[in-house]
Image (cartoon, rainbow, N blue to C red):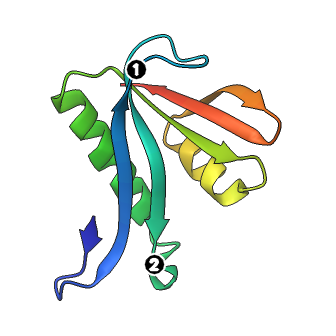
């Protein structure tokens, strides 16, 4: 979670450990959701949350982190791709991303 110095929540990331599934061949850290307060969007905070998640994954012995995005969510997909996430599969309008850490 990211907060201002006054304790106002700017955004949060929800992640968990997942066993191998679908096209993911080994256990990984899975990002279920990133949520930014609308007033704090466009400030690079999602990048900060992704970096925190990646550090957590590495610190806990994982070498991969993955997530899912809807094809039409171009802003999110651009953010993930700029941070090194690669789209490795698609199903209907679902895009699956993986980053090796």
Residue 7 percent across, percent down from the top left: 19, 84
In the displayed orientation, state which residue is furthest to the bottom: 6
x 46%, y 65%: residue? 35
Mark 2 vs mark 1: which is more N-terminal?
1
State left or right for residue 38 relative to residue 78: left
x 38%, y 69%: residue? 11
Residue 10 percent across, percent down from the top left: 35, 76
State left or right for residue 72 relative to residue 80: right
The answer to which of 22 and 84 lies nearer the viewer is: 22
Point out which mark residue 66 bears. Answer: none
**Helix, strand or loop at mark 1:** loop
Report the residue marked by disc 2. Answer: 37
Residue 23 percent across, percent down from the top left: 60, 16
- Mark 2 closeness class: few <14, some 14–19, many ≥20 residues within 10 Å: few
Asked where in the image residue 16 lies, by quadrant, the reply is: top left
| 31 is higher (above) or lower (below) than 25 | below
In the displayed orientation, state which residue is furthest to the top: 25
The answer to which of 17 and 67 lies nearer the viewer is: 17
Asked where in the image residue 65 lies, by quadrant, the reply is: top left
**Helix, strand or loop at mark 2:** loop
Q: Quadrant of the C terminus?
A: top left
Q: Nearer the viewer, mark 2 or mark 1?
A: 1
CA separation in Å, label 2 and label 1? 30 Å
State left or right for residue 36 relative to residue 53: right
Q: Quadrant of the N terminus?
A: bottom left
In the displayed orientation, state which residue is furthest to the right: 92
| 23 is higher (above) or lower (below) than 67 | above
x 59%, y 40%: residue? 68
| 9 is higher (above) or lower (below) than 75 | below
Residue 18 percent across, percent down from the top left: 39, 27
Report the residue marked by disc 1. Answer: 19
């Amino acid at each position: 979670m990211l907060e201002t110095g006054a304790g106002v929540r700017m955004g949060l990331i929800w992640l968990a450990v997942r066993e191998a599934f679908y096209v993911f061949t080994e256990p990984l850290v899975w990002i279920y959701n990133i949520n930014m307060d609308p007033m704090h969007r466009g400030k690079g905070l999602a990048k900060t949350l992704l970096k925190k998640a990646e550090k957590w994954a590495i610190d806990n012995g994982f070498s991969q982190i993955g997530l899912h995005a809807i094809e039409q969510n171009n802003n999110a997909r651009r953010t993930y791709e700029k941070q090194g996430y690669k789209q490795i599969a698609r199903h209907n309008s679902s895009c699956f991303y993986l980053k090796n850490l």
